[in-house]
Amino acid sequence: MHQALEGIKVLDLTRVLAGPYATMIMADLGADVIKIEMPKTGDDSREFGPFVGEESAYFMSLNRNKRSMTLNLKSEPAKELFLEMVKEADVVVENFRPGTMEKLGLGYEDLKKINPRIIYAASSGFGHTGPYSNRAAYDGVVQAMGGIMSITGELGGKPTRVGPSIGDIAAGMFAAIGILAALQYRNQSGIGQKVDVAMLDCQVAILENAISRYVVTGDVPKPAGNKHSSIVPFEPFDTSDGEIMIAAGNDALWLKFCQAMGKEELAEDASFKTNALRNNNYNALRPKIAEVIERKTTAQWQEILDRAGVPNGPINTVDKVIEDPQVIAREMIVEVDHPVAGKLKMPGVPIKLSETPGSIRRPAPLLGQHTDEILKEILNLSGEKIEELKNQNIF
Amino acid sequence: MHQALEGIKVLDLTRVLAGPYATMIMADLGADVIKIEMPKTGDDSREFGPFVGEESAYFMSLNRNKRSMTLNLKSEPAKELFLEMVKEADVVVENFRPGTMEKLGLGYEDLKKINPRIIYAASSGFGHTGPYSNRAAYDGVVQAMGGIMSITGELGGKPTRVGPSIGDIAAGMFAAIGILAALQYRNQSGIGQKVDVAMLDCQVAILENAISRYVVTGDVPKPAGNKHSSIVPFEPFDTSDGEIMIAAGNDALWLKFCQAMGKEELAEDASFKTNALRNNNYNALRPKIAEVIERKTTAQWQEILDRAGVPNGPINTVDKVIEDPQVIAREMIVEVDHPVAGKLKMPGVPIKLSETPGSIRRPAPLLGQHTDEILKEILNLSGEKIEELKNQNIF
C-alpha cells in the first residue's frame, strides 16, 4: 500500500508538542520522519508523565511512526553530519526560540545554501518577526493573549483555558499545512522555502466569528457558556443521570424535537414558532424543555432523539469517548505495541484517504534507537566510520 | 509573486464553516477556489449576523479570495455543466450529510469516472463510514461527544464548550491537510482519491494527553480550570486592574520570577525550590505570589516580567487582540475592502511562507458574482450559450 507522503524525508528537531504534532501528522501520512534528539536527554517530553514502566505515554502518543537518532548539534562534527543529512532531506522542522538555529549556523539561510530545495519549517511562540519575536511562550500564554480564553467559559464567568493545548496543536496543524503547500510549490518550481508559524498567529486565525462580531458591533465578546448565541434550543440539558447536548438547529428540527418530547403543544405555541421567537422567549421556553428532559436518562434521550433525527449527543468524558461505537468504527483509537512499554491506546489518524490511507507502522522510538541505521542509510557511512564518530561523543 | 497553490482549481460546494474554512486556507495560499452556491439563497452563512449593510460579516470573513457562481445541482443541465467543470478541476470539496452527493449522481465514484485525477474531499459530522454516518451534527454536538468539553472548564466545574467552533475548525484544517497530502501523492502517481474527514474524529485527534492520561492511570480527566496540571506557577493571577497569565515553566524561570517580584526570599525558601516541591506546597505558595501580583497593573507586570524573561501575557479580549503590536506586526489582522460592505477587519494568513507568501487578493464574492466569468473561462462557453442556460433557471 502506498502512502501519500512516501519518499518525503523530514529531519525533525522539535520537542514537546507543536512541532512533534506537525511531524506526527506527516509521519502518519507516510513521510519518513527522523527525530534528531539531544544525546542522553532527548525530547523534554520523554520526562512527562504518566509513564508506562520508564516510557512516557505523553511522548509515545506524539511520536509514533518516527525514528530517533541522537546528535549533539552544539558540536562541530555533529553539525557537519547534520548538514550532510540536509543535502539528502526534503524538510527540516524545528520549534526552538527564534535565533537558536542561526546561532548554531544552521538557520534557513545556511541550509538553503547547501540545499535550495529544502523546506524549512519553524514553529515558535510569536514567530520569527515582530516585537515579541524573541520571547518564549507556552500554550497557556498564547491562549491568554490570543483571545480564545476570553470567549471560553461559563456565561458571566471568567476567561477559561481550553483543556487540550490548542495553542500548540493549532500551530502544529498550520505548520503541517505550510509544509505541504511548500512541497506543492517545490514540485512545480524546484525551489524550497521557509515556513514561519507562530502560536499566537494561529490563535487569532481560529477565533472564528468573534473578530467580525466585535469589529461590526463594537461589543467585546465574552464567555458565553454552553448555549449557542443565536439558535434555540442549542445547548446541554440535564437528564436524570447526566447531561445531553441538543441542537435543534432550525424550525423543522424544532418541530421534530417537540414531537420526540411528546410536547406537540410546544410546537403549536405561537411564542416559540420560529427561531427568532424562541430566542426572544428563551427564559419562558427553557424550563419547559428542561422539565421534560430531566425525566429520562441520557441514553434514553439519545435513542429517542436519534430516531427523530434531532442532532444530539452525550457530553462524553474520555473513558466514554474511547468506547464510542463510531470512534471505534472509524479507528480513531488505535492500540500501538511498544517494545518496552507494551500496548498503549492513542488517537488514530483523522484524515481518511481512500488510495493512500494513513497508518501507524511503528511505535514511538527509544532515544537514539535508529542512529546507526540512519547514518548507514542516508549517509552511507561504514560501521567503522560510525564507531569513529561515536568516540567524538556526538551521539 | 507566485503563490504556493497557484494553478490548483477547487470546486467548492461547502457551506457555513468546516468546509469553507478548509477552502479559505487553500485560497489564501493561492488556489483558485470556485464557490458553487444554490441560486437565490447561497451559502446559509450569508444569512448569519452581524451584517454590514446587507452583507454578512461572518460570511465575508470566511470566503475572501474565492469566486462565486450559482448552480442548482438538482437540475439535470446543471449537473451536466458541473461534470464538465469537474473534468477541468483538481479538487472538489463538499460538506453535505453523507449520501447527498451520491443521490445527486455526483459522488466520488461518479466524479472519478470522468476525472481519475480528481481529489474529492468530504467533511461531515461523523464521516462516511460507521454506525453514526448518516446523522447530522453541529459543532456543539461533536464538542460534547468528542471529549473536549469534559476537560474544559473551571476546576470542579461543569464541562464547558470551547468558544470558537473548534469542532468545525479542526475538521476544516484536517481536510486541508488531507487535500494537500492527496495532491502530493497525485503529483507522483497521477491518481486522485477521496479524503473523508469527520468532525468527531478530529475532536479525538486534538484531545492531546487526555487519552494517554486516562488509559495509563484510569483517572477520568475533568475540567482543570486555568492552572497547569503539573507546573507551578503556571496560571493567571489577579492584578490591580485585571489578570495576567504567568508561566514559570522550570526552576530557572522560578528564580527569575522571584527576583522580578522582589521576593528573593521565596526563591530561597526550601519548600519551593523545585517544581515538585512547588506542586506539593501549592496551597501555601499561591497566596504568597497572589499578594504581590495584585499590587500592580497588568501592564506593569508585563513590562517587569518581559524584562526578566519570564513568559507571561495578558488575558486579552478580542478588542485587545486586534490592537496587539505583535498581531499587527505579523499582519494577523487585515482589512479587506468589499465593494458593497466597505472595509472589514478579519484574521490574516497564519502560514508565513518566504517564497510564496499567502495573500488576500479579493474580498468575499457576492452571490453568483462570477458565474459568467467562470463559465467562459473554464468551459469556454459563448455569451449566447450562457444566455440559453440562464433560461433554464439553473443559475
Image (cartoon, coloured by chain):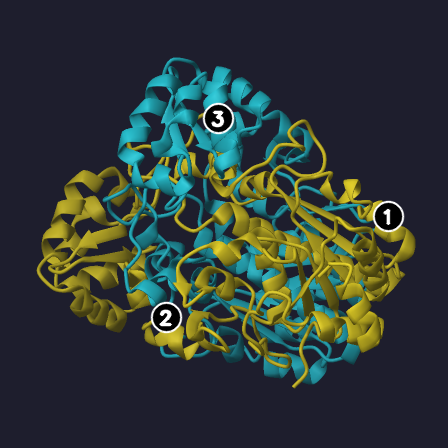
Chain colours: A cyan, B yellow
| Residue at image point 60% right, 32% down | A345
Q: Residues within 10 Å of mark 1 (few under 14, many from 20)?
A: some
The residues tagged by marks 2 and 1 sit, at their Cα atoms, a distance apart of 52 Å
- Image: A266 above or below A391: above
Quarter of the image holding residue A189? Answer: bottom right
Q: Amino acid at mark 3?
A: Phe
Percent position of residue A395, x then y = 62, 60
| Quarter of the image where one finds residue B309 | bottom left
Which mark lies nearer to you, 3 or 2?
Answer: 3
Which mark is drawn over residue B110?
A: 1
Graded by Cα atoms within 10 Å as few (under 14), some (14 to 19) or many (20 or more), the crowding at tag 2 reads some
Q: Which residue is mark 2?
A: A135
Q: Quadrant of residue B318?
A: bottom left
Task: Please state, as top left, top right, bottom left or bottom right, where the C terminus of chain B lies in the image.
Answer: bottom right
**Residue A319 at least partly seen:** no
Same chain, labels 3 and 2: yes
Q: How much space separates mark 3 and mark 1, taking CA atoms? A: 36 Å
Residue bearing the label numbered 3: A257
Residue B375 place in picture, x, y as percent: 78, 71
Residue B177 appears in view: yes
Question: Which tag is nearer the camera, tag 2 or tag 1?
Answer: 1
B213 w.r.t. B353: above or below:
above
- Chain under label 2? A
What percent of the width, then of the height, locates residue B95? 65, 48
Separation of residues labelled 3 and 2 (CA atoms): 52 Å
> On the rendered structure, is A196 left or right of B327?
right
Q: Chain of mark 1?
A: B
What element does badge 2 sit on? loop
Q: Residue furthest front?
A: B391
Q: Residue furthest right?
A: B113
Q: Nearer the viewer, mark 3 or mark 1?
A: 3
Horizontal placement of A361 versus B149: left or right? right
